[in-house]
Image: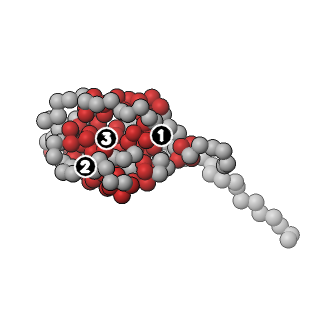
Amino acid sequence: MPGRPIWQCAGKREPEKELEAQRWIEAVIGERFPDMPYELALRDGIILCKLMNRLQPGIITKVNVSGGDYKFMDNISQFQKACIKYGVPDTDLFQTTDLWDQKNIVLVTQTIFAIGRTAYKHPEWRGPFLGPKPAEENRREFSEDVLRAGQTVIGLQAGTNKQATQSGQNFGASRKIILGK
């Protein structure tokens, strides 16, 4: 569709989510974003690398602050590797081109929120968090007696099981027999 901005093609951006992610990053790294659009501030990967190094010091050993496009794309790649080391599921990571070519900024924001969720799992992190705390497993152990008792119970979510029949149920059209053809 000619005339549509590129960001509308990949997914609907949510400015309030982007602002929430930006504010969290600023709080974590102790710096304000430069005076430019969100996606351009993140594009060289420097801020993202600072974020990961603040969450887990030394996780990225060399951040390229100059050197051109390939060096900046390398920052994004290092950031993605650091996310995996930190515990972010790889399914939550954006592709380099999503940010570099601004093809899908929505995924970039989702990755930042995934980092925020993962930070809850790091007790050494005492800084600000992003998003709701993920649920933790609540494992229960039942004795054999309790498990056996559960097998005798008939579930009644659908109503009663007394005099249950399939009468009156009719699936599809009935068969038509045409004679004389």
Residue 50 at x, y = what percent?
25, 41
* Residue type at tag 2: Val
Mark 1, secondary structure of its residue: loop
> Residue 139 or 43: which is nearer the viewer?
43
Q: Which mark is residue 100?
A: none
Q: Marks 2 and 1, Cα distance to the nearest angstrom?
A: 72 Å
**Residue at 41% from the left image edge and 31% from the top image edge:** 35
- SS of the residue at dot 2? loop
Q: Position of residue 63 (x, y in %)?
A: 25, 49
- Residue kind at label 3, given as amino acid type: Ile
> On the picture, is 106 further left or further right than 116?
right
Asked if marks 2 and 1 touch (Cβ < 8 Å), the reply is no
Residue 131 visible in image: no
Name the residue located 45 percent from the left edge and 29 percent from the top edge: 16
> What quarter of the picture does the C terminus occupy?
bottom right
Among the two numbered marks 2 and 1 on one chain, the one whose residue lies closer to the N terminus: 2
Q: Does residue 35 lie above or below 4 as drawn?
A: above
Above or below residue 157? Residue 177 is below
User: From the viewer's perspective, is the residue at label 2 or at label 1 nearer?
Assistant: 2
Disc 3 target residue: 47
Disc 2 crowd rating (10 Å Cα; few below 14, some 14-19, many 20+) is many
Query: Which residue, given by chain and number where applicable, does mark 2 sit on?
Result: 63
Residue type, mark 1 in image: Gln
State how far apart marks 3 and 1 are (Cα): 67 Å
Q: Secondary structure at mark 3?
A: helix
Q: Is residue 22 left or right of residue 118?
A: right
- Image point 34% across, 40% down: which residue? 112
The residues bearing labels 2 and 3 have C-alpha atoms spaced at a distance of 10 Å
* Disc 3 versus disc 1: nearer the observer: 3
Q: Are marks 3 and 1 in contact (CB under 8 Å)?
A: no
Instruction: Write down the residue under mark 1.
Output: 163
